[in-house]
Amino acid sequence: MRYLLLSSCLFILASCSSVYKNLQPATGDINYIQKFKPNFNSALYKAEIDVTGHHLSGLLLIKTLPDSSIRMVFSNEMGFKFFDFEFKQNGDFNALYVVKQMDKKPVIKTLKKDFELILLPPKYTQKAYLLKDNYSLYYIFPKQKGSFCYITDLNGSEIKTMEISSPHKPIVEAIMKNYTNGVPDTIGITHTNFNFTIGLKKIER
Amino acid sequence: MRKIILVLSILISGLVAQAQLAGYTPVTDLAKFKEQFAVIAKKTETIKSDFVQEKNLSMLSEKIVSNGKFWFKKDNLLRMEYTRPYQYLMILNKDNMYIKDGNKENKVSTKSNKLFQQINKITIDCVQGTVFNNPDFITKVYENKSTYLVELSPAGKALKEFFKSINVIIDKSDYEVTTIEMNENSGDNTIIRFTNREINTIILDAIFAIK
């Protein structure tokens, strides 16, 4: 029992060591965050990506397949495909197609992490824990380096923002707004450490 | 050995049958077709039309349909305006391209990007009738009762990355392009169908102006 307490304390200390160190531990059901998991049965978004001064626009189709895997296909308005990503239910990821100009490891890795953040929940949920301050609840999902963090109001009625954090600071901030039938109408992803934003606006078909 | 040859022959004949497009046979008088196509294309100064674009994602059983308006004027002036379900405008004026996407505007010189140049040349070549002179593609021509089908297979590595083939369907009655099908290696494709075509009506240059 003493070892269990010690290891729990060490874990909490390690977890709170920097980026969320000013927050208080909170009790509650970590799986409550599932409430905000978007239901991407088949949703089409107008997508705008800005990377270090370059603007890329197109259509992003997000579709859940019968095996529960989620596919994201990004093409431009005239039909030229940029990428086709597969997110398996068990957390595996496959880049099924990436246009040569984008087919670079750091690019794919960045996009994969960004989209994993909005798909909720991330892997390693068994290590997840809850923190709070006077205004918000923080659902923290530690990753190999840093963590994914979902921030709701204290009542858990609204998801305010989502973050990917390095051990020291948030490096990606994302929002999902105006849910209709479980599908957000607006999604925004912003990198704080370099000029990279993704904006998605749902298209009614 | 004879059995192996027999099996191989059956396999090869199957592949040949598959390679030929369903319902189409190779055109019998290719020279006549090229000549007629070139004559009509030469007379075509302007085209104004509506279009419906269908992006088919085969593995996902999904279809993304968009509509818009198309304007073409000789030489090398093209405007494609997507109106539904999103707004997107593309103008090609000689070597310059202008894109308006929502409130964002972008100007690109196609001279600086070979791939852009090659892709834009396809549409222009199709409507101008110069598609057979395009060294970026190997062309084959097929026909059925009412249409010709010009199959363009990319010759270079860069275009092969995007397309397995591009099929241009031409109405036999007036030699006008009715459909462009861009087939990807994955089995996905994009089909643009032109409707309500108006040939040689007056289109002002201002419509292609890049400000």
Image (cartoon, grey):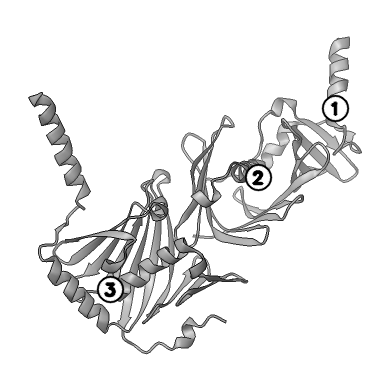
Local crowd size for mark 1, using a 10 Å CA cut-off: few (<14), some (14–19), many (≥20): few
**Residue corresponding to mark 3:** B129
Do the residues bearing badges 2 and 1 touch, measured as CB atoms within 8 Å? no
Three-letter amino acid code at disc 2? Asp
For the point 20% across and 42% down, which residue is it?
A: B15
Whole-percent x, y for residue A17 in the image = 87, 32
Per the image, label 2 sits on a secondary structure element best described as helix
Three-letter amino acid code at disc 1? Ala
Which mark sits nearer the N-terminus, 2 or 1? Answer: 1
Tell which of A37 and B200 is nearer to you: B200
Q: Chain of mark 1?
A: A
Decide: is B134 above or below A172.
Answer: below
Q: CA distance from mark 2 to mark 3?
A: 45 Å
For the point 8% across and 25% down, which residue is it?
A: B2
Q: Which mark is residue A14?
A: 1
Let me know if marks 2 and 3 both belong to one chain.
no
Per the image, label 1 sits on a secondary structure element best described as helix
For the point 13% across and 64% down, which residue is it?
A: B145
